[in-house]
Image (cartoon, helix red, strand yellow):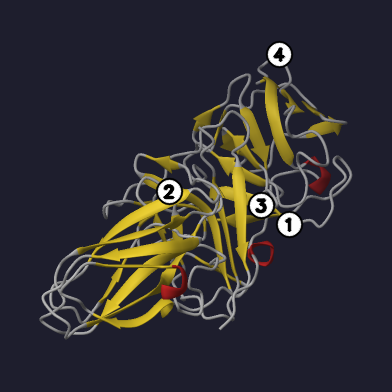
């Protein structure tokens, strides 16, 4: 088995821009004319209530392709005037959505409120955009919620901690959310003895480092970082002791984790932290020499950036496994799965599957 280099395994590009809208169109607007970035009604009349939301000056309004007079009119606009019996409604493209870069390919629009479209999200599908000329098309990316181990939507989903299922809360950045995309190419399958091959339990404390860590990875780098596992044979000489694993994280900072063995063994005990390297393993004394232990890495992959949590939930934008959008991965929060959190694909890494994960980053 071989490991790819970190540069092979990680995508270092930033993710798609996320733009917020207060509401979305829910039908054709009263006739209008767009001149440049400005939409002006052809006749007097109020915008009124749209999708259950009373329109107001300053709101960010997403004009959806199905409701626009022309595809080139699609965009996020700030309402300048709601109109009335003696006034025309007017809106202007929002200042953060009025260039080809700011409102271009892959941009995501998140709608905050509305009877039908609250917390819905859409992504621009055009390969290129010339604003006010290109007929902009979008696809809806369902906004979901779920619990760890049971993600229920492929986009803008949140993995709740402690088995609590709650509605996803709208992302509350002023106009955009910092998103990072991790891309892992063919990460290796979990390997129970990649760090150290099988050893007998001992009635005396034992410490292993350097050449003693004789697995196929040993003291070398795991790319991407992975959680550490200890697999034991089923034997009375395996005691519920705390094994101390020392190494480094993705940033080469020191990382230490205590992993408690299951009494009498016969299982794989898994850590939750993401190690890039392991430099030392300390095993306390056991009841005797009849059991065996081996040390490797598991199925959890360390994130490159610290994942944002909200009310104890990790905010994930999209998961892709082997070229397909999925919503079934589980997440370890950065508070425990140091340093930045972990991702465990539903379909475990096997050396052949590629994975992409877009998530909100915590820069605090």
Answer whether labels 1 and 3 touch (C-beta < 8 Å). yes
Q: Secondary structure at mark 2?
A: strand
Q: Earlier in the sequence, mark 2 or mark 4?
A: 4
Q: Position of residue 34 (x, y in %)?
A: 84, 32
- Give the label, 1 or 4, closer to the camera: 1
Answer whether labels 4 and 3 touch (C-beta < 8 Å). no
Q: Position of residue 30 (x, y in %)?
A: 71, 34
Q: Is residue 26 visible?
A: no
Q: Earlier in the sequence, mark 1 or mark 4?
A: 4
Q: Is residue 16 visible?
A: yes
In the rendered image, the vertical position of residue 101 relative to residue 105, given as above or below? above
Q: Which residue is mark 4?
A: 86
- Give the label, 2 or 1, closer to the camera: 2
Crowding at label 2, few (<14), some or many (≥20) Cα neighbours within 10 Å? many
Q: Position of residue 147 (x, y in %)?
A: 34, 57
| Gap in angstroms between the C-alphas marked 2 and 4 | 49 Å
Image point (33%, 47%), residue name: 166
Q: Which residue is mark 2?
A: 314
Q: Quadrant of residue 358?
A: bottom right
Q: Position of residue 338 (x, y in %)?
A: 41, 50
Q: Which residue is mark 3?
A: 123
| Gap in angstroms between the C-alphas marked 4 and 3 | 37 Å
Pick the front one: 272 or 165: 272
Q: Earlier in the sequence, mark 4 or mark 3?
A: 4
Q: Is residue 138 left or right of residue 127?
A: left
In the rendered image, the vertical position of residue 46 relative to residue 301, given as above or below? above
Q: Which residue is mark 1?
A: 125
| Gap in angstroms between the C-alphas marked 1 and 3 | 6 Å
Image point (86%, 40%), residue name: 132
């Amino acid at each position: 088995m071989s490991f790819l280099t970190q540069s092979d395994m990680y995508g270092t590009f930033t993710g798609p821009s996320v733009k917020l809208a207060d509401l979305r169109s829910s039908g054709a607007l009263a006739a209008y004319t767009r001149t440049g970035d400005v939409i002006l009604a052809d006749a007097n009349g109020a915008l009124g209530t749209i999708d259950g939301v009373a329109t107001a000056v300053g709101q960010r309004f997403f004009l959806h392709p199905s409701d626009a007079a022309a595809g080139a009119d699609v965009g996020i606009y700030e309402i300048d005037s709601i109109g009335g019996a003696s006034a025309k409604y007017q809106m202007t493209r929002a200042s953060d959505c009025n260039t080809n870069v700011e409102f271009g390919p892959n941009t995501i629009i998140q709608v905050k409120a509305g009877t039908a479209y609250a917390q819905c999200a859409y992504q621009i599908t055009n390969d290129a955009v010339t604003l006010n000329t290109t007929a902009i098309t979008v696809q809806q990316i369902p906004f979901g919620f779920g619990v760890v181990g049971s993600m229920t939507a492929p986009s803008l989903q949140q993995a709740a901690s402690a088995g609590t299922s709650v509605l996803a809360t709208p992302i509350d950045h002023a106009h955009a959310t910092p998103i990072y995309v991790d891309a892992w190419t063919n990460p290796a399958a979990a390997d129970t003895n990649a760090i150290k091959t099988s050893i007998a339990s001992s009635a005396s404390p034992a410490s292993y480092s350097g050449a003693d860590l004789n697995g196929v990875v040993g003291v070398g780098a795991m790319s991407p970082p992975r959680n550490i596992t200890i697999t034991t044979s089923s034997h009375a000489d395996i005691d519920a002791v705390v094994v101390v694993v020392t190494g480094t994280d993705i940033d080469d900072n020191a990382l230490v984790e205590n992993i408690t063995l299951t009494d009498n063994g016969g299982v794989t005990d898994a850590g939750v932290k993401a190690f890039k390297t392991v430099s030392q393993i300390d095993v306390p004394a056991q009841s005797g020499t009849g059991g065996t232990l081996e040390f490797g890495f598991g199925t959890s992959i360390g994130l490159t950036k610290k994942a944002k949590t909200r009310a104890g939930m990790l905010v994930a934008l999209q998961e892709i496994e082997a070229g397909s959008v999925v919503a079934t991965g589980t997440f370890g929060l950065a508070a425990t799965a140091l340093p930045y959190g972990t991702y465990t694909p539903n379909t475990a890494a096997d050396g052949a599957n590629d994975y992409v994960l877009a998530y909100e980053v915590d820069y605090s």
